[in-house]
Image (cartoon, rainbow, N blue to C red):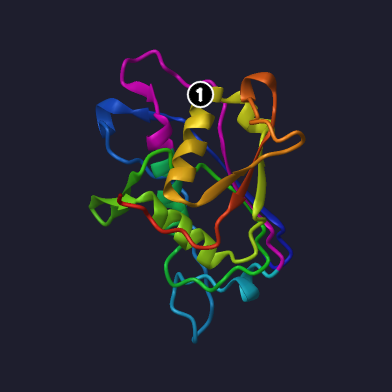
Amino acid sequence: MRKLRGFELVQSQWTDRRKYGNSVVTPRLVLKFNGGEDNPAGRLVYEDQFPVLETIRISKSHLVQDISTEAMDKLSVGEYFETSVSFLYKSFLRKGNSRGESVKRLDVPFPPEEKFRQVTGESCEWRDSSEFWDRAVEMFPNLVKYAAIGGSWKKARPAEVNAWVVLGEKLGFVRKIKQGAGKDPDLNLGDDIYLEVSESVKFNRN
């Protein structure tokens, strides 16, 4: 895997409510990293195992699901993020990993609310969304700091994307950058939103 430049997980948007209810569901994918005698099992050392990895992406599967039963239901935006982070926290964003100096793009679902549920063993704990950003920026110090919200984001409802930007500014991890004549961009008109990602994210409890 030393030549891998991009990793993508195509993740289902569906859950079986009859079986799992509103519990956090996790992808049935477990990545095991073997770093040798000097590296605890499971710890990822990027310079040894993924020295040229640049992009980590989680995208939505658009396969048609069997929804003939009432049990199958689409994950909410918050649930989809929680499913994604449950995988990331056990792999690429696992606590104790080395820094991934080569990683520049983290194209994954972002926390839509101020808090999210993290799977810890057999239960879940509520975490501040700022924790996710702190961990991402700490582990990937060379992430591209200027990101354009456009492209695939335009397929989402503009109201939801704008709500995420407002939340990001409130939490202090992004700052909207005005372009051109300095007017505010409008996703409804097809504009891109340019954001500056903060190097350090701290949750504001005011």
Instruction: Name the residue: 63% across, 19% down.
Output: 188
Indicate left or right for 125 with 76 as reference: left
> Relative to residue 52, is residue 187 depicted above or below?
above
Can residue 91 be seen in the rendering of this structure?
no
* Left or right of 13 on screen, residue 151: right
Residue plotted at (60% across, 71% down): 46
**In the image, residue 37 lies at what x, y percent?**
49, 86
Residue at left offset 70%, top offset 28%: 191
Q: Which amino acid type is shown beneath numbered disc 1?
A: Ala
The residue that mark 1 highlights is 159
Which residue is outermost to the left? 123
Secondary structure, mark 1, is helix
Along the line of sight, which residue is nearer the eye, 45 or 164?
164
Residue at far top of view: 68
Instruction: Assess disc 1: are there few (<14), some (14-19) or many (≥20) residues with their C-alpha within 10 Å of its C-alpha.
Output: few
Give 34 or 139, whichever is nearer the viewer: 139
Dividing the picture into quadrants, the one containing residue 40 is bottom left
Q: Residue 200: percent from the left, percent from the top?
A: 49, 62
Residue 88, image x, y percentages: 47, 54
Q: Is residue 38 visible?
A: yes
- Which residue extends farthest right? 180
The boundaries of the magenta stretch are 52-80
Residue positioned 43% across, 55% down in the render: 132
